[in-house]
Amino acid sequence: MDIYVDTAKVKGRRHVHFDSIDQLLEEIKRVREADRDGSLETLGNWSAGQIMAHVAAWIEYGYQGYPTGPFPFPLSIIMRWMGRRIIKKGMQPGLKIPRVEGGTYGQEKLTVEEASARLEKALLRLKSGEACQFDSPAFGPMSHADRIELNLRHAELHFGFLRY
């Protein structure tokens, strides 16, 4: 039986910041190398593969469609305001999507090699400037620049649970 860890209370997380997709791509290489040499450590509930698969999934949803519909009206207004704040200040650990098993989507159990390849592909698609076809169910329509920043903040949150 797995023991659930409240990720909002995890100690020892790294403070990670990405100014660009290229910086995140470099971090993925470092994580992959740390996994290969056995120095990679994960904190929280997910493996490194799950973390990267999750970040990739949320980028892909903008192109393929989200697994959930738009948030209800009052909540959508609050979330759009929070989106601006998240882009500037980052995401907090421990938040969950109500009534979703595990609190979020895209928790596939992949190896680091599989997940890193998937995440790199998703990031290169985002970096190419290809317009996303689907609006965020939480934050609504976003500029491409804001979508990149939101995905970088999302990666910062999750990559902070990886140490090497």
Image: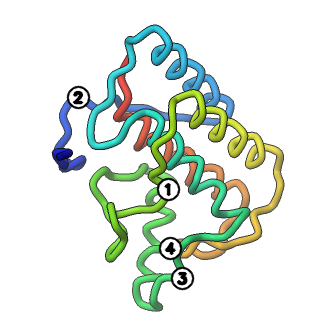
The residue identified by callout 4 is 138
- Cβ atoms at labels 2 and 4 below 8 Å apart: no
Q: Amino acid at mark 2?
A: Gly
Q: Residues within 10 Å of mark 4 (few under 14, many from 20)?
A: some
Specify the amino acid type for callout 3.
Pro
Q: Earlier in the sequence, mark 2 or mark 4?
A: 2
Say what secondary structure mark 2 lies in.
loop
**C-beta proximity under 8 Å, tags 3 and 2:** no
What element does badge 3 sit on?
loop
Q: Percent x, y for residue 36?
A: 50, 13
Q: Report the residue marked by disc 2.
A: 12
Farthest top residue? 37
Of residue 91 and residue 134, the one placed in the foreground of this image is 134
- Name the residue: 50% across, 42% down: 155
Give the mark, 3 or 2, whose residue is nearer the N terminus. Answer: 2
Which of marks 1 and 4 precedes in the sequence?
1
Q: Which of pointers 4 and 3 lies earlier in the amino acid sequence?
A: 3
- Circle 3 sits on which residue? 70
